[in-house]
Image: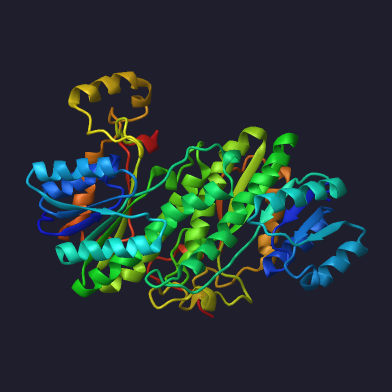
Amino acid sequence: MKLQNKVVFVTDADNEVGKSVVKRLSEEGASLILNSGSGGGALAGELADIREAGRQALVVNVDLSSGEEVADMLAAAEEALGSVDVLVHNQALVRKASVETCEEALFLESLKINAKTAFFCTRAVGRQMQRKQAGSIIYVSSIHAEKPTGSSFAFSVSKGAVKMLAKEAALVLGRSGVRVNTIELGPLDGREDGELFGSDFSTLYRDYEYKVPNASLGTSDDLAELVLFLSTDGSRYVNGSDIRLDGGFLLHYMNHKMKRP
Amino acid sequence: MSIAGKIALVTGAGTGIGQGVAVELARRGAKVAVHYNRSDAGARNTLSRIESIGGEGCLVQADVARKEDIDRMAEAVADRFGGIDVLVNNAALQLNYDFFEHDEDSFDRMMNINLKGYLQCIQAVVPYMKTKRSGRIIVISSVHSKRPTDFDAVYAMTKGGIRMLARESAIELAKYGITVNAIEPGAVDVGKQSVRESKPILSEEERERQKHARSSILDKFPLGRVGKPLDVANLVAFIASDESEFMTGSSIRLDGGSMLL
């Protein structure tokens, strides 16, 4: 059990990535703080498994972009479970929007959900981790922190901001033994990435499953394994890294030689 | 390589890099709209320098955190000069706050000016560029779009977002013949200018004196000096010209090699 006595805060436990992370980390003995917009409803199965295994999960539902709400919630959670050892920030609001016509409200909402929450969750757990002189902060980001989409620019802009937050925090909190890393996630099996990110301006998602060199898409379980690695001391020298998790999807230049069945 | 007769809007042109860019573009024959928000004395100084070398310019005031200000500014420039060919997105806020000093107010202020402001300035000029099937958008970013500052995490977040904004805008606006590129300056000597206190550009003697006072900084620059606004202006002038037509979505580091050390 790699995470016995460790407290992990997962910021969006309801989405697919969140559920896989919850399942994998709790299997390793972690106690969990789960922010759930559904109040745990979307997680009923996962929560039942956690309780059956005799582990702890605290379900909360706070505004993660409010520094005060997050700090108050974490102070209460500390009483119940202890201070946070690992933060898994996995907010992902993807909205179709064009640079030319995007409304201010949509742009600000994307920044708020994807980037502002990352900053204020980091600030709150960073204080707890500084006291302990240890901790790991993991942002589940996207290859679109680097590669434009042509369809959902507000998402890539906000993930570009998180990429730099990770580097700032890796430096500042790094002096207190805290590691901060970003996972740049590519397309997943079973998720409609072509729908999410496809565009008229970019051919990136045309036949995208074959652009992964081995023509085999990853899953949220692959992501959970990487999150587990970054949560443990085995990754003690990994800090301020952007880890691309896409099976090599981004390596194509002009889409030559795709491996097709 | 000519930009004579082109109409350029330079934001934040009352101080520092923006002032240097505005004056140089005018010296090369462009008609330059000098934008400012609070640096009215600085902006007047920029305009008088433009006029003293026989250039043509005008002043436009706007708060780039407010869309209605930005739209009014673009309209005023187009009315005055008959269109907009070049936008230099430069106006930005840097607060130099420690990581834990930032609160929701400072976070929002920086995002609104640095990131939303850049987006909305792009949105405001695109209609004028579209009608000519040609345009140059140049965003002044920073080496801190890739490397942390260690003194202002939110500033770096905005620059990380700007990097992606430039890339997304580049693929989306290409169909109109509009290119979008980012310049990433390192340290630039802007004298003692600030938003509140604007002075004319330093004389050569003053510049020399500053060089010696800052010799430890100069060890960090392979080329032996920090940047000048004119260095940035020369690159802006190239990107603004017709000769740069095949370059879009590029981020050009302009730092005397300092990022290499």
Name the residue: 23% across, 47% down: B235
Q: Is residue B138 above or below residue B169?
A: above
**What percent of the width, then of the height, locates residue B48?**
15, 42
Q: Is residue B22 left or right of residue A153?
A: left
Q: How many marks on residues?
A: 0
* Residue B85 in view, yes or no: no
Give the camera-side residue of A93 and A20.
Answer: A93
- Residue B63 at what x, y percent from top left? 37, 54
Q: How is this picture coloured?
A: rainbow
Residue at far left of view = B54
Left or right placement of residue A54 versus residue A134 in this view: right
Q: Quadrant of residue A183?
A: bottom right
Q: Visible in this render: residue A132?
A: yes
The N terminus of chain B, quarter of image: bottom left
In this picture, is A2 found above or below B218? below
Residue B72, placed above or below residue B218: below
Q: Residue furthest bottom?
A: A261
Q: Pick the quarter of the image with the C terminus of chain B.
A: top left
Where is residue A36 drawn, in percent x and y? 74, 65
Q: Position of residue A223 (x, y in %)?
A: 66, 61
Q: Residue at x 53, y 60 (%)?
A: A111
- A44 or B92, which lies in front? B92
Residue B125 located left or right of residue B103: left
Position of A158 with respect to B20 (left or right) is right
Q: Residue at x 31, y 34 (%)?
A: B193
